[in-house]
Amino acid sequence: MNSKLKGTLCGVGAAVSYGMNPLGVLPLYADGINTNSVLFYRYGLAVVIMALFMIVQRKPFSVTIKELCILMPLGVLFVLSSLTLFESFHYMDAGVASTLLFVYPVLVAVMMAVFFKEKVTAVTVFSILLSLSGIGLLYGGGDTGTLSLTGVMFVLASSLSYAIYIVVVNKSSLRMSSVKLTFYVMLFGLSVIIINALIGGEDTAIQRLTTLRMWIFASILALFPTVISLILMVIAVHEIGSTPTAVMGALEPLTAVVLGVTLFNEAFTFRLAVGIILILSAVIMIVAGKSLSVNRVTMIIGRFGRVLAKHWRWK
């Protein structure tokens, strides 16, 4: 398998897996489990799973001081991204939070351009705009009311933390397997959660999971949007770069919509169909990359405009 195909498949898999966050989080919230406890079980189970992977594959656990100095901040960044995103679910719908979270590909592209002089192509810019428009259509018709400023700030903090995490993974000097990197990121993230539980008082105290149902949803949360997503994301970033991997994150909220339609009998509307088409088009453009000419991009923009015009007339 060539490098680009491998990176693309891993990027898609990472985004789809990460989009399953609400599937594990919301049922645990409904059972009265607080945010810090949800994250404790998410990271704790993920650490156990990753340790078993490493033992089975006979990978060494040893790391250098230099590697620890990079892995520790990565763990802090990722847990901050998770903590702020999960807190935002208390202030707004998970779908709206997922929409706002997609600011992170823009932040990744800006950081790569400003700090690492990476050229931002017309295809990349248009792909980001196209995916943002598609996500807006996925959730634009909901009765969300006035957005909570607190919720928005939590999501933006999550987006910034995740963007920095992706850039550091790409540009750091770490040369270790994705499994080993993810294990230590989860381990240091778990340490932050435990410290938060010890100093945060009753609101952050670790609660027990008392039913099989709770353990099932905690396991889903640890496996799909954590272990699988992080391993695939690391591979994708190394193979195709930070910005293309981030843009493929548009599949995250798309996953939430698909789950809602297939598992929770939510209506599949024309608006959703247009949003899905726009997101998939953005991902295809990123995959095609340099093979797309400026004229081709212009033609796509024209078609995009006609689709939107038809949509608003239909609406």
Image (spheres, helix red, strand yellow):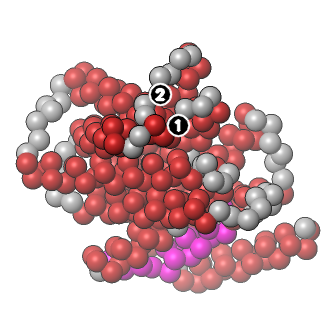
Q: Are marks 2 and 1 in contact (CB under 8 Å)?
A: yes
- SS type, badge 2: loop
What residue lies at 46% left-to-right and 62% top-to-bottom? Answer: 157
Q: Amino acid at mark 2?
A: Gln
Predominant SS of the magenta segment: helix
Quadrant placement of the C terminus: bottom right
Magenta region = 118-135
In the foreground, 157 or 3: 157
Point out residue 128 in the picture as x, y percentages from the top left corner.
Answer: 55, 70
- SS type, badge 1: loop
Point out residue 242 in the picture as x, y percentages from the top left corner.
Answer: 37, 63
In the foreground, 43 or 147: 147
Residue furthest out toward the front: 201
The answer to whether residue 122 is magenta is yes
Q: Quadrant of residue 231?
A: top left
In the foreground, 25 or 51: 25
Left or right: 29 as drawn, with respect to 9? right
- Tag shown at residue 207: 2
Residue furthest out toward the right: 314
Q: Give the CA distance from mark 2 to mark 1.
A: 8 Å
Q: Quadrant of residue 16?
A: top right
Question: Would residue 298 be visible to someone looking at this image?
Answer: yes
Q: Which residue is mark 1?
A: 34
Q: Earlier in the sequence, mark 2 or mark 1?
A: 1
What residue lies at 78% left-to-right and 73% top-to-bottom? Answer: 308
The answer to whether 47 is drawn above or below residue 17 in the figure is above
